[in-house]
Image (cartoon, rainbow, N blue to C red):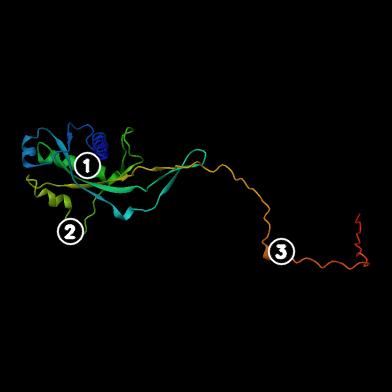
Amino acid sequence: MSIVQQIDDALERQLLQGPLRGINAQVSFDPPTADWAARRSGPCLNAFLYGLEEDLSQRQSGELSVIDEQGVVIGYDRPSRFFTLGYALTVWGDNPRDEHRMLGTLLEWAVATDHLVPNPSSRSTGLLALNLRENHTGTESPAAKIWLGLGPAARPILDLLVTVPVTGPGTPVTTEPVSGLALRAARLDPPLSEERPRRPPRPRGTARPHRYIEEIG
């Protein structure tokens, strides 16, 4: 299962356990085209994935050491790269009042929820950051721009962003770890040019100089 499918599953699970709990509504990831809207039956929350981009502000370089329980470096990992998935959330009910009720509950959930919890069987580790896109004054949401090409009539859109870390394969250590050091010493004769000059021979009859040794008790 790909990482995008894992995020879809986590998002659907938390929507059904949160804002859609107790409501007979389904979650759809289909593009909300005019044809889809005509075929829809019953209350529905549409989570259309309209974009995926890397968050370059969190990108790092270099390598991270992987250390085992004994404190030995067993490999190297590259830092995670963070990608943001944009979901256009829209609610579809039998009448506008039902839709507004679902929309209000969905808005409260999105404001109060900071992360998604991935499924235990997924490859993602940790929590997935979740927040609503902040649009500056005078700018239009990317989800709203894409909506114009889908076909159905305009309706309120919650632009939900999910950020996920993606890590590539690591590099194992190929050499054995150092367990100790061995030192060896050897005598090296100095080169001839560095030898000390020999003393001249002592003339005959000359007394040998005395060496005085004092014993220290």
Closer to us: 171 or 96: 171
| Disc 1 + disc 2, Cβ < 8 Å | no
How far apart marks 1 and 2 lie (CA) works out to 23 Å
| Disc 2 + disc 3, Cβ < 8 Å | no
Q: Residues within 10 Å of mark 2 (few under 14, many from 20)?
A: few
Q: Earlier in the sequence, mark 1 or mark 2?
A: 1
Q: In x, y percent, where is residue 176? A: 50, 41
Residue designated by label 2:
139
Q: Earlier in the sequence, mark 2 or mark 3?
A: 2
Residue type pointed to by label 2: Thr
Q: Residues within 10 Å of mark 3 (few under 14, many from 20)?
A: few
For the C terminus, the quadrant is bottom right
How far apart marks 2 and 3 lie (CA) works out to 87 Å
Residue type pointed to by label 1: Leu
Whether residue 185 sits left or right of residue 82 in the image: it is right
Q: In x, y percent, where is residue 165? A: 32, 45
Whether residue 145 sits left or right of residue 120 in the image: it is left
Residue designated by label 3:
195
For the N terminus, the quadrant is top left
SS assignment at label 3:
loop
Closer to us: 184 or 174: 184
- Establish if 76 lies above or below 94: below
Residue type pointed to by label 3: Glu
SS assignment at label 1:
helix
Residue for point 91% across, 67% down: 204
Residue designated by label 1:
106
Q: Residues within 10 Å of mark 1 (few under 14, many from 20)?
A: many
Observer-side mark, 2 or 3, equals 3
SS assignment at label 2:
loop
Q: Earlier in the sequence, mark 1 or mark 3?
A: 1
Observer-side mark, 1 or 3, equals 3
How far apart marks 1 and 3 lie (CA) works out to 93 Å
